[in-house]
C-alpha cells in the first residue's frame, strides 16, 4: 500500500501575522464577554456602548490588516502568475474578492 502524499495547506497572506491576529481576536472575544457581563449586571448604557465601539474599532483593524494582506499576497501573487501565464482570470477574481470585501466593510 502506498502512502498518500499530503501537501501542506496553502500559505495565506496573513500567515506571517497569524499569531498577532489570533491574539487580537482573543482580546476581542474577552471584550465581548465583558459586555455580556455588563448587560447582565445592568451597567450604564453609555458605558456599554463605549465598549461596543472599542470592539468595532478592534475588528475594523483586524479587517483592514487582512485586506492589506490579501492584496499584498493574493492579488500581487496572482498578478505575478498572470505575467508568466498570460492569463489574467485569477487576477480579476482576486480583485473582485477584494472589492466585495471592501464593500462588506463599508456597509
Image (cartoon, helix red, strand yellow):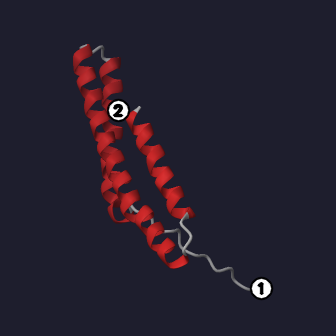
Picture coordinates of residue 53 (x, y %)?
27, 29
Q: In which quarter of the image is residue 51?
A: top left
The disc, 1 or 2, on the residue closer to the chain's N-terminal end is: 1
Badge 2: how crowded within 10 Å, few (<14), some, or many (20+)? Answer: some
Q: Name the residue under label 2.
A: 32
Q: Quadrant of residue 47?
A: top left
Residue at 50% over, 79% down: 84
Q: Is residue 92 above or below residue 60?
A: below
Residue 97, labelled with which disc?
Answer: none
Nearer-the-camera pick, 7 or 91: 91
Q: Is residue 74 left or right of residue 21?
A: right
Q: In this view, does 21 lie to the left or right of 7?
A: left
Residue at 23% over, 17% down: 46
Nearer-the-camera pick, 61 or 19: 61
Name of the residue lying farthest toward the bottom: 2
Q: Is residue 37 above or below residue 67?
A: above
Q: In this view, does 44 lie to the left or right of 92?
A: left
Image quadrant holding the C terminus, namely: top left
Name of the residue lying farthest toward the front: 86
Residue at 39% over, 58% down: 71
Residue at 30% over, 48% down: 24
Q: Mark 1 points at which residue?
A: 1
Measure how far apart labels 1 and 2 are at the Cα level.
Answer: 50 Å
Nearer-the-camera pick, 39 or 18: 18
Could you tell me which secondary element the residue under label 1 belongs to? loop
Name of the residue lying farthest toward the right: 1
Q: In this view, does 54 lie to the left or right of 101?
A: left
Picture coordinates of residue 1 (x, y %)?
77, 85
Q: In this view, does 60 lie above or below 98?
A: above
Amino acid at each position: 500500500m502506498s502512502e498518500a502524499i499530503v501537501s501542506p495547506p496553502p500559505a495565506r497572506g496573513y500567515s506571517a501575522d497569524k499569531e498577532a491576529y489570533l491574539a487580537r481576536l482573543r482580546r476581542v472575544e474577552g471584550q465581548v464577554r465583558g459586555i455580556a457581563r455588563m448587560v447582565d449586571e445592568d451597567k450604564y448604557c453609555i458605558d456599554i456602548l463605549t465598549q461596543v465601539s472599542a470592539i468595532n474599532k478592534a475588528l475594523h483593524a483586524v479587517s483592514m490588516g487582512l485586506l492589506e494582506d490579501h492584496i499584498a499576497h493574493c492579488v500581487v501573487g496572482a498578478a505575478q502568475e498572470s505575467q508568466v501565464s498570460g492569463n489574467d482570470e485569477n487576477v480579476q477574481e482576486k480583485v473582485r474578492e477584494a472589492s466585495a470585501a471592501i464593500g462588506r466593510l463599508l456597509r
